[in-house]
């Protein structure tokens, strides 16, 4: 028996990296998974097939979470198809790194739109059905950068810090309806995106982490299982760092 048997879960940006790892782990724990993707149709079809092998219901939706109307429509479609949304995982995100003096307005705006506005859009779309059901768990993906900042990432750090403030407010507003809202702040997680980095750089990063390794998508996914399940029924408004002790 999985921890999430029969739960209907929506996850944004799931075709690669952390999002993909989360989707697979949730399905292995018995959850039905609806996920969004923007452009990678082939990767989405492949993921859908993989998720179905766990004997759960799974469907990919080509939808832009940063677009308010698209987010509303996507959630309405999921409810039509799956019957309900019990867990929302806001994972979609991008980076447009540059020092502030070189950062364009467009690069600031786009990161805020995709990383932060999408969280507002998707949360707005699920709260009415969750309130009617008087239960729900919203899990928002921030970053250690949202807690401590990072040179060259003012836009990304601002968006990820914004997610923390937003989530704590949602937790306060919706707690009386038995809807929980928590944040996961991953540290250095090794995915296909980090695989292209210089090995020496990656090695130095690993050495600086108390657990002496980068994290895996599964490390983040395990935290999602906990926050999506009834094991965390009395936990809301919290930020869980999954960073190997980086911010200790």
Image (cartoon, helix red, strand yellow):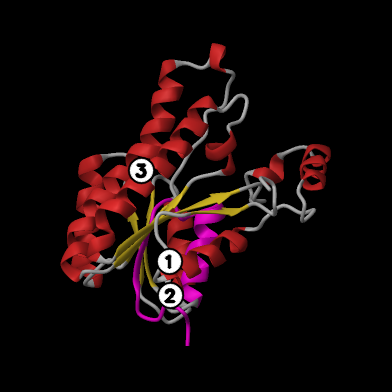
CB-based contact (under 8 Å), mark 2 and mark 1: yes
Residue 248 place in picture, x, y as percent: 68, 48
Residue 166: give its label: 3
SS at badge 2: helix
Q: In this view, does 232 lie to the left or right of 214?
A: left
Residue 90 place in picture, x, y as percent: 40, 51
Q: Is residue 44 left or right of residue 61?
A: right
Q: Give the labeled residue for mark 2.
A: 52
Residue 176 drawn above or below residue 170 = below
Write the start and end of the magenta stretch as one range: 1-28
Indicate the quadrant where residue 175 lies. Answer: bottom left
Q: Looking at this view, is 43 or 103 the one in front?
A: 103
Q: What is the C-alpha distance between the residues marked 2 and 1?
A: 6 Å
Residue 48: give its label: 1
Q: What is the C-alpha distance between the residues marked 3 and 2?
A: 33 Å
Residue 156 place in picture, x, y as percent: 50, 32
Is 139 contained in the magenta span?
A: no
């Amino acid at each position: 028996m999985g921890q999430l048997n029969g739960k209907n879960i929506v996850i944004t940006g799931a075709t690669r990296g952390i999002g993909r790892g989360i989707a697979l782990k949730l399905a292995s724990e018995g959850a039905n998974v609806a996920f969004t993707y923007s452009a990678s149709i082939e990767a989405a079809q492949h993921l859908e097939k993989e998720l179905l092998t766990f004997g759960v219901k799974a469907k990919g939706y080509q939808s832009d979470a940063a677009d308010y109307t698209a987010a509303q429509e996507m959630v309405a479609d999921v409810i039509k198809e799956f019957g309900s949304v019990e867990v929302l995982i806001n994972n979609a995100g991008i980076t447009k790194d540059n020092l502030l003096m070189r950062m364009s307005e467009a690069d600031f705006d786009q990161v805020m739109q995709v990383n932060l506005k999408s969280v507002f859009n998707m949360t707005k779309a699920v709260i009415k059905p969750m309130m009617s059901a008087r239960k729900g768990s919203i899990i928002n993906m921030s970053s250690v950068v949202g807690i401590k900042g990072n040179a060259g990432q003012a836009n990304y750090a601002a968006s990820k810090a914004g997610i923390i403030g937003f989530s704590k407010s949602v937790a306060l507003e919706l707690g009386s309806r038995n809807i929980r809202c928590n944040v996961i702040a991953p540290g250095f997680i090794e995915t296909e995106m980090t695989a292209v980095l210089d090995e020496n750089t990656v090695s130095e990063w690993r050495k600086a982490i108390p657990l002496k390794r980068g994290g895996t998508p599964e490390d983040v996914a395990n935290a999602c299982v906990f926050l999506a399940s009834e094991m965390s029924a009395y936990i809301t408004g919290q930020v869980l760092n999954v960073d190997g002790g980086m911010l200790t």
